[in-house]
Image: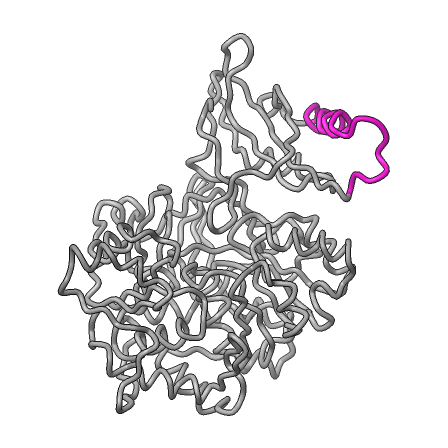
Amino acid sequence: MDRIYTTDRENFRKYTDASTFDRIVSFGTVNEMWADRVKEYATLTAIEDDGKKYTYAQLEEDAASFRPLLGTGKRAAVLCPNSYDFVKAYLAAVTSGNTAIILPPQLPADAVYGCCMKLGANELIYHPALEEKLATVKAAAPTLPLINITAKADEPAGMTDAKPSDPCVIMFTGGTTGRSKGALLSHRAVMEGTVNGCYGYKDVFNQRYLLVLPLSHVFGLVRNLMTTLYTGSAMYICRNNKDMFRDIAMFRPTVLVLVPALAEMALMLSYKFGKNMLGPDLKYIICGAAAVSPYLINEYPKMGISLLAGYGLTESANLVSGNPDSIGKPKSVGIPYPNQTLRIVDGELWLKGDNMMDGYVNEPEESKTAYEDGWFKTGDLVRIDEDGFLYITGRSKEIIVLSNGENVSPAEVEAHFNAPAFIQDSQVFEDVGENGNRILALEVVPRMPELKGIEGDVKKYIISELEKINKELLPYQRVSRIEVRDTDFERTPSMKIVRYHKCR
């Protein structure tokens, strides 16, 4: 079945008061947005990092002093940990006519060199703390300009003109194939993702954000940093996630942008030590980059905090949909954001829109495969309900084809086993049975605080309860073996569960 859905920003109006909603306006480029925000919020704190506060005016002044060190119309790689220096350099690069290539700071020296060459970097901005990662670049590409991120020019330079279609940033993504690639996002796409981060909740402007996600990830760069700056908010940079709760107590954020694994950890610690673990002022947790458990959505309001789930891709400048009614529809990833068209083909979501990437850099075959007739094929299996809310039901590449020809979506089956409050995460996979036959197997990670008071063997209790669920599934969805893990699953840098290979 092939269906097409259009989007409308008015779908979000009822979730925000009228005056706030009307302040959510579009800008064609990062340059245009940043110039406007510097003027409007000049004296407000934009960034707080390493014990120092920087106003919007100061951030622009420091970006202006960095721009003359860069070329124009080049690709400037940025190798820097989360810090004020990153924000300054990123803004300087994209507002001076360059495309910022965001390199994850954990890359080894050989990978830094490889990424610079593959993505066509003309210069490399680096933080002194990561200078050892330049070893291969210095040896193999001695003519590549290296720019110390802490340097300043004698004279400042203003922003250049930009068009919405101009390239803005290159972000790494696994895309639909799982192999790391560079997705090129235009100014239009970045600004679309930035503005989308303002829809679906009441307290939008002049908030206090804490940054714990890496700025090398699109969720951290667009939803955390860019939406912070767009809304005249302040962002406190947590340099070490081990200090997250200390920093929360000191900064008292009103909004946190988290992946589900961090939201889970914060909830468990809050139950153990009290709400002050998340600060007395926290109102919203924006949660995404992996599947969000309805358990989290239902538990956080008990502490006076709304957890808002969403869905996005690097290729879509992060944001495709956001759920303004998480309590009413806890299993949904929300309403699609405006200026997109959604198409569902054989259950798979295809996208067009102003937020979409221009393609994978220097990957013509990958780019060609990712699109069909101008539609980006997400690889995500979805459905849309009668109220226009989107649901993710699985990944097309993860479908397990059984020997009888039936197709099983692991995510769809996992949703049933994740329903009990005592299950934190699960994974359904194809394995080999005792007789050498192919079977479906299940591993689960329990949420131990929810199992207090259970007498006897806790693992036996968990398996017994999950077997009850198993019997209610369609015959071809039932698992033949259930195991309870003592440790978490292996996870990607964005905290998604690493899927087992077939018949591991």
What stretch of residues is rendered in magenta?
450-472
Residue at x 74%, y 71% (from the top left corner): 280
Residue in the foreground of this view, choosing between 350 and 198? 198
Residue 59 on image: x %, y %: 42, 84
Residue at x 40%, y 56% (from the top left corner): 314
Residue 248 found in image quarter: bottom right
Residue 461 shown in magenta: yes
Quadrant the N terminus occupies: top left
Q: Is residue 215 left or right of residue 211?
A: left
Residue in the foreground of this view, choosing between 19 and 228? 228
- Overall secondary structure of the magenta stretch? helix
Residue 144 found in image quarter: bottom left
Task: Say if 267 sits above or below 28 in the image.
Answer: above
Q: How is the image coloured?
A: one colour
Task: Say if 337 sits above or below 351 in the image.
Answer: below
Residue 354 at least partly seen: no
Residue 149 found in image quarter: bottom left
Residue at x 55%, y 55% (from the top left corner): 288
Residue at x 43%, y 54% (from the top left corner): 313
Residue 20 at least partly seen: yes
